[in-house]
Amino acid sequence: MHKKLFIPGPVEVKPAVLEKMATPMIGHRSKDASQLQKRITGKLQEILYTKEAILLSTSSGSGLMEGAVRSCTLKRAAIFAAGAFGVRWYDMARSNNVPADLFEVEWGTAITPDMINEVLSTGKYDLITITHNETSTGLMNPLENIADVVKAYPDVVFCLDAVSSAGGSKIKVDEMGIDICITSTQKALGLPPGMALCTFSRKAIERAQEVPHRGYYLDLLSLYNYIQKKDHQYPSTPSLSHMFALDYQLDCILDEGLEERFARHVEMAEYTRQWAREHFALFADERYLSNTLTAVKNTRNIDIADLNRELGIRGYQISNGYGKLREKTFRIAHMADCTLEELKELIDNISDILKIKNYC
Ligand SMILES: *Cc1c(COP(=O)(O)O)cnc(C)c1O
């Protein structure tokens, strides 16, 4: 039996999108492939509120995260982490020999604008990385306030990991001065895993032009240059299947309406939080809760793996805590095309299992 996914990626994908993945192939050097790339770009620019370039990468989101820090750091990268995904960016910098420093806050708390100001005011850094939505802790960093601070440093390239928020939460890329905003297909956009996408600003392009060793496959500048020179095509063969599905799903997202889509995510988040507060507690700081997933603190010390087994029998799957938060938290994702009704159905089942097991 298929288990309906309420995990923070891959998410449940609707059948119409899965069908688009099975579209017969076209040549990746054809006019049709160029048109496909162009259509996707236009729609992504709308969804991310940007006029800057859009790059697609046949990798998961981590590929573009690695590509961004390597392609655009000339001096030193300031890496901010509020959980596992922030730290991942630091590991990527280090393993690519990119000079970087890690600034980590306690899991469950947010990265503050003051902290960023203090670090950037040293003048040591020319690139900053921020995780918008920290999927390991269910926390959404205060992006607007952070962006206001970063704007005061025009030489700093602003990279944002929006992997688990873009398409589910409003990110005004140009207005906030984000130079590289990264996401992947299998989270709030609602597609199968296997492709990543990002915005790439003029400032980021100019920076990359100065960086001598940007790698090969994940060199953001070479992706950009190829798109310019070869009429919206890629240096190597992209996952055309994902592109067919993206072309379709981005239409669905725009048809739903961006404001409506973001409001649906807030509504689902509020419902989940309310349930979590009544039965358990929330893991993240109440002031910075994620709109796309909720991390529930396991205050009743229930056996989460067992809860998930029971849910599996009923056709649902949630996530255990990430890494060191395993069994200490569990995570319910409410993103992409998930509806409030589907979420209520899941939560009713969780409540029912908890009752049967005498947990609540
Ligand atoms: C899932 C996730 C990633 C990793 O993305 P992949 O597409 O699996 O490489 C990075 N950052 C955040 C915040 C995520 O949720």
Image: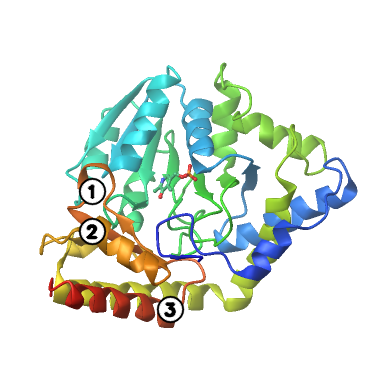
Q: Is residue 304 above or below residue 127?
A: below
Reading the chain from its start, which is encountered first: label 3 or label 2?
Answer: 2
Residue 13 horizontal/vertical position (percent): 56, 64
Give the residue number, with chain letter if any, for mark 1. 326
Which amino acid type is marked by label 3? Glu
Q: CA distance from mark 3 to mark 2?
A: 21 Å
Q: Which residue sits at x=56%, y=17%?
A: 213
Q: Label 1, secondary structure: give it.
A: loop
Image side of residue 253 versus residue 127, left or right: right
Give whichever of discs 3 and 1 has the lower sequence position: 1
Q: What is the count of numbered marks? A: 3
Which of 360/138 is in front?
360
Circles 1 and 2: CB distance less than 8 Å? Answer: yes
Figure check: 118 above or below 40: above
Q: Nearer the viewer, residue 50 or 109?
A: 109
Q: Amino acid at mark 1?
A: Arg
Q: CA distance from mark 1 to mark 2?
A: 9 Å
**Residue at position x 78%, y 44% in the image:** 232
Residue 48 in view of the camera: yes
What residue is at 24 percent from the left and 34 percent from the top? 103
Q: Position of residue 30 (x, y in %)?
A: 89, 45
Residue 111 location, x and y as percent? 25, 47
Q: Which residue is mark 2?
A: 304
10 Å neighbourhood of mark 1: few (<14), some, or many (≥20)?
some
The picture quadrant where one finds residue 82 is: top left
Is 67 drawn above or below residue 147 in the view shown? above
The residue depicted at 53 percent of the width and 72 percent of the height is 258
Which numbered disc, 3 or 2, marks the residue closer to the eye? Answer: 2
In what element is the residue under mark 3?
Answer: helix
Residue 342's label in the rendered image is 3
